[in-house]
Amino acid sequence: MPFPLFDAPPREPSAFVGFAGNIIDRQSEKRGDDDVSLALDDPATRVIVSGGGRIVLAQEDRGFRPFFKPMHAAALGARLEGAVLLGRDETGPLVAAPADITADLPAGFKAIDHRSVYVQGLIDPDALGALAQGAALLAWHASHRFCGRCGAETTMKAGGYKRACPACKAEHFPRTDPVAIMLAVTPDKCLLGRSPHFAPGMFSALAGFIEPGETIENAVRRETFEESGIRVGRVAYHASQPWPFPYSLMIGCFAEALSEELLPDLSELEACRWFGRDEVKAIIAGTHPDGIVVPPSGAIAAHLIKAWAAD
Ligand SMILES: [Zn+2]
């Protein structure tokens, strides 16, 4: 008999967002310090080449391929000595390597920024999950070369899942920065805001970093109030999304609005207002008279907005 608390949908909502479709077996309990070099000697190994917020893709007949043999990855600029092991899938080990990606890649290869790869759906969803894992890990290594305790240069261990300090013996682990992204709702309206850097016409759910010592729910209440002046009561978790810019986890929630009078923080938001359900349905359908749009379909904000509009 199923446990009643687990009366969940057959696929959890997080499975539908971009960057989430990661099928890699991380084998986190078995990571050894020589794992990357062993993987690079394995003929089945494939390498993601990533640098400066972009990855290298090979143009093929039906789309793009993000994986290369180690030798080919090196020829495309990958620094294999800085590679990290993502884990294994049914084909073999998967590795991500940092690269100085130059403008003059050989014909048939392109360097494309992570956001475009995801928004334009250039690679299959499983590979998008591997991209997020590799990009986040490589970004952390790039900014944590030196020991935060004593300043000595640290070395990579455990296939890239640790850095160790030879001087003071401190160990440093990759971080994930939690961000709350929330849709404040009343029975018939939801709250959307617009940052100055958004594409023209775009509105989205409000969001902000969760601070040390704060629950997800309290972060949702604090950020919603700071950005919009709206007081929030109950908070319900909906879905999460790995967000490799550089290493966040977006935690998507619905928030019960207790007030409706807006007092937006105009230093953060260019605009912030309530949208009725019919208006949101028109936005989703692409028929809003003012050309208002919401983020692309893989974004967790889009999932929150669509789930609310449909219910
Ligand atoms: Zn140290």
Image (tube, grey):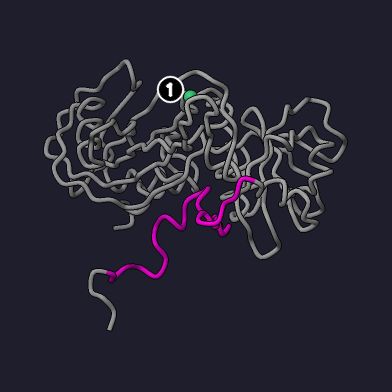
Q: Quadrant of the C terminus?
A: bottom left
Residue 4 sits above or below residue 285 on the image: below
- Left or right of 118? Residue 149 is left
Q: Which residues are magenta?
A: 6-33
Residue beneath the point at 63% across and 52% down: 127
Q: Is mark 1 within 8 Å of ligand 1?
A: yes
Image quadrant where residue 54 sits? top right
Q: Looking at this view, name the residue that lies furthest to the bottom.
A: 1
Q: Position of residue 4 (x, y in %)?
A: 23, 74
- Residue at image mark 1: 149
Up/down of 266 relative to 58, above or below: above
Provide residue 249's location: percent of width, then percent of height: 42, 41
The three-letter code of the residue at mark 1 reads: Arg
Question: What's the residue at 44%, 36% (across, down)?
Answer: 175
Residue situated in front as seen by the camera: 233 or 54: 54
Q: Is residue 197 above or below residue 175?
A: above
The picture places residue 207, in percent across and down from the top left corner, at 34, 34
